[in-house]
Image (cartoon, rainbow, N blue to C red):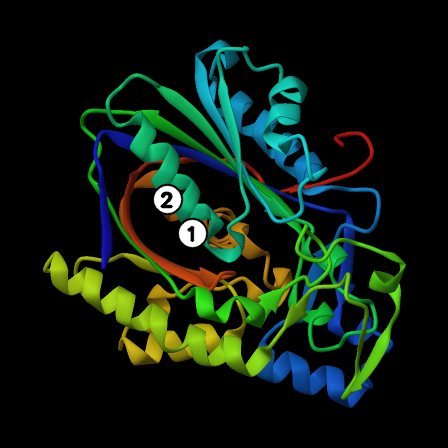
Amino acid sequence: MALLEINNVALRGVSAVVPPKKVSSYDFDFFSHEEAELFVDTVGIKNRYMAGDTICASDMCCVAAERLIKDLGWNKEDIGILSFESVTADYRTPPTSCILQDRLSLPSSCMTFDLPMGCCGMLYSIAIVGSMMQTGCVKKSLLLIGDTITRMSSPYDQSRVPLFGDCGTALALEYDENADKIIADFNTLGSGFRSLITPHSGFRHQVTPESFKYEDFGHGIKRAPVHSVIQGMDVFAFAISKPPKSIKSLLDAYHIDKDNDIDYFLFHQANKKIVDTIAKKIKIDQNKVPSNIEEFANTGGASIAMLMVTDIRKEIENKPLSLLLSAFGLGLTWGTMLLKTNKVIVSDLIIMNEENK
């Protein structure tokens, strides 16, 4: 176990933004009505919000950040760290966090950095920024987590397109000597990196005219090397085996009673079957496992933050909660985090438009 303990850091607020275009699983041309119905029943995804070509993850995160800063009543001059976690950055260079520092009018004393950790992004963001804050040198930080995952897929790949949705989120962390300890466990299986990959996207295989040539793989899968690939069965096997062991290990290491000490288990919203299987493996009450997969699909690293906004807002705003977070994805990576909250500010979910872009 790669255990990490963070002291003196509290979650103060969370916000989320989705693009305006809502797409039903019944709208995809590659699905017949019967196929769409089967997909909804088995995978659990009925709708998702898709950004299209004009909205970037940074646009949604910027709106989420502005709303959260306003709702918290924070002075921007007090924000010492701005992180941006995404696999859909504005450019290869410079880091998108630098651009967002300017867009948000944060002080030049604000440290910025990007993280490309995919579906584990929120947990990594909290762990890294939280670790930097626990001495008190930085009092307030903004963690932006978002992706336009649907823009990474071939529009003709029915193994990938219907699984994902787009969004942007913002989390606020603050130094607090009375905060409960944050505990996390992180793991990596680099040998599985090809299970979730965009073949022609970096400097190992740079983009050339060949990158845009489509190949028909059968079974409704037609894509080019520039599009992202998901090896569904490999990812499923990984997701239902590694994360449950990490959850059990963390609970055992800290003598945490899963039935009495945890209010909610917030799992990365990959799909219904994966979430249900993990819950069954660790034998927890399904009422403690909120889900928004049906309406938002898999929103990557932001999916757990989205759950806080869409599913447990009333509870997280009004009383202390003990939350067990579990995420898994690119790399392959997976992590578990115990996060205790106390009356967190949760902004209204924002549907983006041209006025607030």
Q: Position of residue 38 (x, y in %)?
A: 67, 87
Q: Disc 2 to disc 1, how far (Cα)?
A: 6 Å
Q: What residue sits 38% from the left and 66% below the top?
A: 289
Pointers 2 and 1 in contact (CB under 8 A)? yes
The quarter holding residue 253 reads: bottom left
Position of 174 with respect to 18 (left or right) is: left
Outermost residue, front direction? 204
Q: Is residue 234 visible?
A: yes
Nearer to me, 337 or 75: 337
Label number found at residue 312? 1
Instruction: Name the kind of residue labelled 1 in the image.
Output: Ile
Nearer to me, 35 or 154: 154
Q: What residue sits 59% from the left and 56% below the top?
A: 299
Q: Position of residue 130 (x, y in %)?
A: 33, 34
Q: Residues within 10 Å of mark 2 (few under 14, many from 20)?
A: many
Position of 3 with respect to 337 (left or right) is: left
Q: Position of residue 36 (x, y in %)?
A: 74, 82
Q: Is residue 267 visible?
A: no
Nearer to me, 134 or 2: 2
Position of 58 with respect to 212 (left or right) is: left
Q: Position of residue 159 (x, y in %)?
A: 70, 77
Label number found at residue 316? 2
Q: What residue sits 36% from the left and 77% below the top?
A: 241
Name the quadrant of the C terminus. top right
Secondary element at tag 1: loop
Name the quadrant of the N terminus. bottom left
Outermost residue, left direction? 255
Instruction: Name the kind of residue labelled 2 in the image.
Output: Ile
Q: Residues within 10 Å of mark 1 (few under 14, many from 20)?
A: some
